[in-house]
Each structure stands twice: as structure tokens, then as C-alpha cells.
Image (spheres, helix red, strand yellow):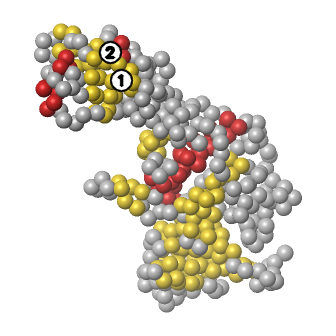
């Protein structure tokens, strides 16, 4: 077994790479699956060479290992991320030392929040599989909520985080409904993979990690024990050789633990309401009302299944605002004025109920309504 490890730290500071090697380098890297990675680096900095002048927080840090006594060995990158702390110390006998702490590129998944719902019964019914949910240009977890954010004037802006999704398995499992109310992206991963793993039982489920390659962060999601899409970056280790010395580990303390059953028991926290028609071929259950006269008022309502006029389901509620619709008019549902919602049970801290209302008009010239030419409003 090789026994002469070499270590190298490269920090990108001010557009230039600062390389640190030597005996006075102490490194501890913790790599994880389904969670973020981190690193602690101790540097002998007797001449204050690195602190602030050549290193600073938020710099990109890369950590490499290799073995001098392994013929043909080359540098293996085991970590990539961002410096989060610099702690200089001058009270030690060896002079000034510098302690660096860093989070992996995957910290972006913890820092960025997702505010969207997905699944065949959601407001985004076409976003029901893993890859679609992660990469959709308008609503994807990675493309919209990790790579972008709304700035102080509500303009969509690059976050500075870039996650490559080329190594994500295109898993076909369809998700019915899930809602993320400003949820950290890595927690969204946990929910999505739990749903998929539960649906694939008894087959193996999925797991994820971030593999750094230079300054690129590759998100790898694949089936446990059988990596296909991510194999080039995250190869499946054979059961007889699950860990490679010099690539996966350099030093390790081993311990034997009792094995336990690994079951995924999932209870869906979010479920689309059933039995509540609202705009789904329910126009006869709506009622018009004149708020000035406090009397019922005739309204021209119908159900419309034309594509482009409904958001969920298969219909929208069409309200034709002809002469009969002019003036002050309200419509309400149901005609009994009672939705039968028990608001004490409608939501919990884990399952937050939302009511979304969408409407469009097919004629924006509102003055024509009074002239009797008519207009329509469609809601869903």
C-alpha cells in the first residue's frame, strides 16, 4: 500500500491561483452522500504570506492528493468549494499558523431556497419526473432556484452558483404532487428521492453527491449500486473493491457496526384536494350577486376545455361579461357560500396549504364592456 502521500491546496484569489504545498499542511476532508461536504486546512504561515493578502473568505478552494511512491500516480481532486473562515494564530511555538474552513460546492443547495410545487396534480403538471423538476428553465430547482434569485428590485439575477446536471439519472418515476414553500434545495432532494425510492420498492432507490472537477460542480444522482448516467464521474464500486486507497481515502479508522434494516417509509405531506370542483366543469355551482342591490344576479358562466385557458385539471371557468355582466357584479362558489373547510385542520407546519387563483381576459379594452360589445374573463 502506498505510504508517501502528498497534499496540495489551490485557492483562486482575485482571479489567480495560489498553491500551497509542503510539510506544514494539515488537511481534514469530510465527503458525504446525500449531504454537503466540508474541509479544514491548517497551514504554517510564519511570514503571514497567505492571510488576507493571498486568501480570503468566499475564494474557491480545491484540495488534491497523490502518492510519491505510487508509480504513475497523479493528483486526485478530492474537494472543491468555498472558503468560509480564516483563523490566524500567532501564540504557537512554530510561529503563525492559519486555520482554513471550507464548505463544498454543494453548500449552494443548502443556501438557496425553492418556492414551487411539482407533480402531475400541481400547477406544473408536466414537471413530474426528477430531471424535469431539477432542470426546467422556468421552474427547475437547479436552473431557477439555485442558479438564480430575485434581487431587491425583484429582477431575476445570477446567484453565482453553478451546478452541472449532466450526470443526473433521467429517472422515469412520476411524482403525483409535492410542494416546497421556500425549502432549502438539499431538503427538496431528500423529499424527491424519498418519494422515488418508496415508489421503486423493492428495487434500489437513488442517492446523490457533488463531484468537483476543477471549479465545476457535477451533481450526480444515480441508482444505488448501479451507476449508469454518472458512472464517468461517480463510478459504481464493486462489492469486492468498494473503496480505492489514494482516491477515495488516504487515512481511515475502521470500526465494525451492527447492520440494520434499511426501509423507506414515506407518508406524503402534500395532497391535491379531492372532491372540490372549483373550476372543473362546475360552472352551474357558481352564483352571481349584485353587491349594490344585495340580490342575486344572472351571469353567463360556462366551462371551457380549450388548451391555453386552463392551468390545472382540464377546464377553466369562463365568464362572459356581456351587457348582463356590466356594472358591479360578484360571483362566488359554491352557491351555498360554504366551502366546508375546517381551517383548524387545513394545514400544519410541515404541510402548508396554498390557494392559487389565475385569471386571464380575452379582451383588454374594458371600455367596450359598457358599450355592450362584451368581454370574457377565464379563471382557473
Q: Nearer the viewer, residue 17 or 51?
A: 17
Kindly tell me whether residue 178 is visible in this rendering.
no
Any mark on residue 205, and which? none
| Displayed quadrant of residue 371 | top left
Say which residue label 2 marks. Answer: 286
Quadrant occupied by the N terminus: bottom right
Q: Nearer the viewer, residue 5 or 376?
A: 376
* Residue depicted at 59% across the width and 42% down the height: 129
- 156 on left or right of 72: left
The reply to whether callout 2 and callout 1 are in contact (CB within 8 Å) is yes
Return the x and y of residue 180 as percentages of the image width and height.
47, 41
* Residue depicted at 56% across the width and 68% down the height: 216
What crowding class fits label 1: few (fewer than 14 Cα within 10 Å), some (14-19), or many (20 or more)? many
Dot 2 falls on a residue whose secondary structure is: loop
92 shown above or below 323: below
Say which residue label 1 marks. Answer: 317
Amino acid at each position: 500500500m502506498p505510504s508517501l502521500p502528498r497534499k496540495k491546496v489551490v485557492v483562486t484569489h482575485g482571479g489567480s491561483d495560489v498553491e500551497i504545498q509542503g510539510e506544514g499542511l494539515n488537511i481534514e476532508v469530510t465527503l458525504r452522500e446525500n449531504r454537503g461536504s466540508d474541509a479544514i486546512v491548517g497551514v504554517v504561515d510564519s511570514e503571514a504570506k497567505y492571510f488576507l493578502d493571498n486568501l480570503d473568505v468566499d475564494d474557491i478552494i480545491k484540495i488534491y492528493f497523490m502518492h510519491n511512491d505510487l508509480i504513475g500516480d497523479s493528483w486526485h481532486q478530492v474537494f472543491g468549494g468555498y472558503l468560509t473562515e480564516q483563523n490566524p494564530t500567532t501564540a504557537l511555538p512554530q510561529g503563525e499558523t492559519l486555520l482554513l474552513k471550507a464548505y463544498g460546492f454543494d453548500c449552494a443547495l443548502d443556501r438557496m431556497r425553492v418556492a414551487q410545487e411539482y407533480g402531475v396534480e400541481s400547477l406544473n403538471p408536466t414537471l413530474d419526473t426528477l430531471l424535469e423538476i431539477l432542470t426546467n428553465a422556468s421552474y427547475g430547482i437547479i436552473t431557477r432556484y439555485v442558479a438564480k434569485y430575485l434581487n431587491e428590485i425583484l429582477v431575476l439575477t445570477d446567484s453565482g452558483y453553478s451546478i452541472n446536471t449532466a450526470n443526473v439519472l433521467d429517472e422515469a418515476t412520476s411524482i403525483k404532487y409535492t410542494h416546497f414553500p421556500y425549502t432549502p434545495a438539499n431538503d427538496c432532494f431528500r423529499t424527491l428521492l424519498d418519494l422515488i425510492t418508496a415508489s421503486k420498492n423493492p428495487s434500489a432507490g437513488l442517492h446523490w453527491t457533488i463531484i468537483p472537477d476543477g471549479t465545476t460542480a457535477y451533481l450526480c444522482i444515480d441508482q444505488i449500486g448501479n451507476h449508469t448516467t454518472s458512472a464517468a464521474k461517480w463510478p459504481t464500486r464493486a462489492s469486492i473493491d468498494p473503496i480505492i486507497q489514494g482516491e477515495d481515502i488516504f487515512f481511515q479508522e475502521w470500526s465494525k457496526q451492527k447492520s440494520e434494516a434499511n426501509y423507506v417509509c414515506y407518508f406524503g405531506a402534500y395532497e391535491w384536494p379531492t372532491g372540490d370542483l372549483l373550476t372543473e366543469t362546475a360552472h352551474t355551482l357558481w352564483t352571481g350577486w349584485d353587491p349594490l342591490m344585495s340580490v342575486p344576479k344572472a351571469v353567463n358562466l360556462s366551462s371551457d376545455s380549450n388548451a391555453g385557458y386552463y392551468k390545472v385539471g382540464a377546464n377553466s371557468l369562463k365568464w362572459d361579461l356581456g351587457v348582463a355582466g356590466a356594472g358591479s357584479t360578484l360571483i362566488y362558489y359554491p352557491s351555498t357560500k360554504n366551502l366546508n373547510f375546517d381551517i383548524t385542520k387545513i394545514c400544519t407546519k410541515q404541510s402548508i396549504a396554498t390557494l392559487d387563483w389565475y385569471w386571464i381576459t380575452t379582451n383588454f379594452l374594458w371600455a367596450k364592456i359598457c358599450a355592450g360589445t362584451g368581454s370574457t374573463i377565464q379563471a382557473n
